[in-house]
Image (tube, rainbow, N blue to C red):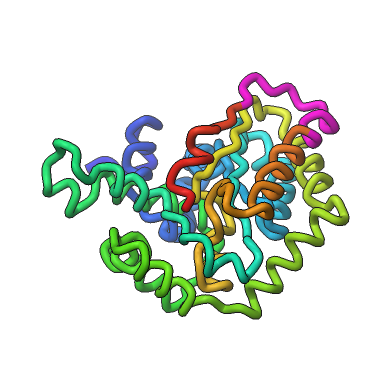
């Protein structure tokens, strides 16, 4: 049987695509030649597209990668996700956001689709795998160990298709109000000081191969899983007209992206805003 390092690059890519993200580092450390042969494959896999939110550590990570000589040149696409924090008192007034996967599954209800798909999920493993890759910043905590044991526990815990009222009640019980307020204050501080514009501008200035920028409600952003774990709840996923703060936050995100593009001088070929997605499955 041929070893991995003797296989054609295309075959190696197919095999590596089946490896759990947490096992990539272990695989690279098994053999120097394997590390060298697969370095570009791994770089492309992890860094061709980066998704971030307007949160300090998420933006700092993007800037750090962009300034890296070995990684910055691999980024061809950056996605800015609209997830944001609402004032605490509004969490009781506004229905909690559906996650991306839950929204998709709710949309399938009532349609002429096999019941087994509704029960077991459509492409959940691939969706969940992508979500883990973009959230690879997490450590091996108890929660992460539970996640690595299979998709079902996490799917049941966060993405179950439950009654909206019980979902909202359960959500507030999990809220870590102290951490939530701390992150909410930092969110406001970044706006006040212009740190987010500065950080994104610095990142885009170094991303010379980035030609596509998206603004979406995706929850596959780097740092979102950590943020959810710290504050206990999922942030507001997208724009909701029930909250003046939400309107201001999404408007500010778009403004940050436009200002950073102009200031950095980056040559963007595709600028994608998803207005329909901004209003779907948000509350």
**Residue for point 84% across, 46% down:** 198
Is 269 on the left-hand or right-hand side of 118? right
Q: Quadrant of residue 263?
A: top right
52, 70: nearer the viewer? 52
Residue 15 image position (x, y, % from top left): 32, 42
Establish if 266 lies above or below 228: above
175, 19: nearer the viewer? 175
**Residue for point 44% across, 52% down:** 131
Residue 178 image position (x, y, % from top left): 65, 80
Is 31 on the left-hand or right-hand side of 65? left
Residue 161 in sight in this render? yes
Read off the magenta span. Answer: 259-271
**Residue for point 72% across, 41% down:** 69
Q: Determine if the magenta segment contains residue 22.
A: no
Residue 203 image position (x, y, % from top left): 75, 42
**Residue for point 63% across, 72% down:** 180
Outermost residue on the right side: it is 193
Q: Quadrant of the N terminus?
A: top left
Establish if 96 lies above or below 257: below
Outermost residue on the top side: it is 269
Residue 197 image position (x, y, % from top left): 80, 45
Establish if 143 lies above or below 156: below
Q: Quadrant of residue 171?
A: bottom left
45, 25: nearer the viewer? 45
């Amino acid at each position: 049987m041929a070893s991995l390092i003797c296989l054609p690059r295309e075959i190696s890519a197919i095999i590596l695509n089946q490896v759990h993200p947490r096992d990539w580092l272990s695989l690279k450390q098994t053999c120097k030649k394997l590390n060298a042969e697969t370095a570009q494959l791994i770089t492309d896999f992890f860094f061709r597209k980066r998704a971030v939110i307007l949160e300090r550590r998420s933006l700092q990570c993007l800037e750090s990668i962009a300034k890296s000589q070995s990684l910055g040149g691999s980024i061809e696409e950056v996605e800015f996700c609209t997830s944001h924090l609402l004032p605490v008192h509004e969490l009781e007034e506004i229905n909690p956001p559906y996650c991306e996967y839950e929204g998709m599954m709710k949309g399938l209800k009532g349609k002429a689709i096999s019941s087994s798909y509704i029960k077991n999920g459509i492409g959940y493993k691939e969706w969940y795998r992508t979500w883990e890759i973009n959230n690879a910043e997490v450590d091996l905590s108890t929660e992460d160990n539970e996640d690595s044991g299979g998709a079902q526990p996490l799917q049941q815990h966060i993405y179950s298709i439950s009654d909206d009222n019980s979902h909202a009640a359960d959500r507030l019980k999990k809220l870590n109000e102290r951490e939530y307020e701390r992150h909410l204050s930092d969110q406001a501080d970044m706006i006040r000081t212009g740190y987010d514009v500065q950080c994104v501008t610095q990142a885009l200035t170094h991303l010379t191969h980035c030609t596509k920028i998206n603004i979406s409600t995706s929850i596959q952003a780097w740092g979102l899983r950590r943020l959810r774990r710290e504050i206990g709840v999922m942030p507001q996923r997208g724009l909701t007209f029930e909250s003046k703060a939400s309107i201001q936050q999404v408007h500010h995100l778009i403004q940050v992206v436009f200002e950073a593009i102009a200031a950095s001088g980056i040559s963007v070929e595709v600028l994608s805003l998803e207005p329909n997605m901004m209003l779907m499955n948000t509350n």
